[in-house]
Image (spheres, helix red, strand yellow):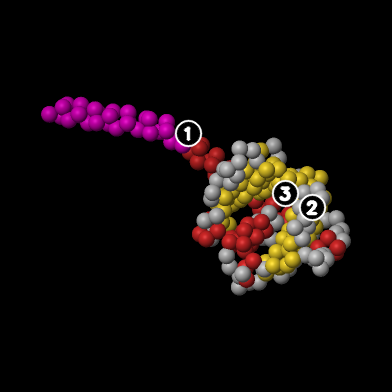
Amino acid sequence: MVSLRSHLAGRYVKVELSMLRPVRGFLAPAALCLLAVAARAETNTVLLDQWLSAQTNLHTWTADCVQTRSLPVFSQPLVSTGQVWVAMPDRFRWELGQPAQTIALRLPDQLLLIYPRLKRVEKYPLNGAQTGPWKEALALLDASFPRSRAHLESGFLVRSVTETNSVVCVSLQPKSAFARKFMTDIRVSFRTTDYSPMSTELRFADGSSMRNDFTRSVLNAPLSEDCFDAKFDSGFTVVEPLRQ
């Protein structure tokens, strides 16, 4: 009786140990994978923090721009060239076409869309009470120059941060359910050398996208106040679409 129980006990122990061997073999690579994921997440957090920190030293930014719009109804994308001027915290001028066919001029209290060929100006107020897709879209454009982590995360979920050849791409998703109805994703790419934008890309719910690639960028150069001058001659028609 004793030898039988000992024999059975030995078998039971042997079975249990054999079951543990593959588990032990699995734990080592699983632990390494977890460590690699944690290290990558920490690296991404550092890159994001460095980008956000660099924004505090940014006062002006200018660049040449190539805008590429991809639309499901067209087999070929639409490409335009232009220039952009930014003065922190709340002014920019964006011209597309040579000579300019469209000018977007943001001032502290309003956004103007100027169409020189049509002699037409559209005015959009930027007051705090305003809601709707236009303000949501403008907030997404502001994501290219976030003032702080709190400012960024107040409007966006950071989906991913990836680095390739010293270029970091931050993928953001609007937190607003209303904004996600027409814009699903915004991507900002920047250099790790100076943290200035290399490109931005907006992806829309209808499958279209708009990408801006920037070259010859200059940081913190003095900008003339004329750059943000909203003057236009009396022959222009001025409309306010949100009030119609």
Q: How would you classify the magenta stretch by its main secondary structure? A: helix
Question: Of helix, strand and loop, which one carries label 1?
Answer: helix
Q: Residues within 10 Å of mark 2 (few under 14, many from 20)?
A: some
Label 2 – label 3 distance at C-alpha: 22 Å
Is 106 on the left-hand or right-hand side of 32?
Answer: right
* Mark with earlier residue (1, 2): 1
- Residue indicated by mark 1: 29
* Label 2: element kind: loop
Marks 2, 3: nearer the viewer: 2
Q: Toward which corner of the image does residue 23 lie, by quadrant? A: top left
5 versus 210 height, above or below? above
Quadrant for residue 182, please give it.
Answer: bottom right
Could you tell me residue 5's position as x and y percent? 17, 30
The region drawn magenta spans 1-30
Q: Is residue 46 magenta?
A: no
Does the magenta portion include 10? Answer: yes
Name the residue rendered at 70%, 64% in the picture: 122
Three-letter amino acid code at the position of disc 3: Pro
Give the quadrant of residue 138.
bottom right
Task: Give the alpha-carbon distance from disc 3 to disc 1, as whole Å.
Answer: 38 Å
Q: Please report the residue visible at 75 percent of the width from the left and 58 percent of the height from the top.
A: 118
**Dot 2 corresponds to which residue?**
100
Judging depth in this view, the residue of 146 and 45 nearest the camera is 146
Left or right: 189 in relation to 4: right
The C terminus lies in quadrant: bottom right
Q: Give me the disc on residue 197.
A: 3
Q: Is residue 21 left or right of residue 47?
A: left
Most foreground residue, 59 or 133: 133
Badge 3 or badge 1: first in the primary sequence = 1
Q: How many marks?
A: 3
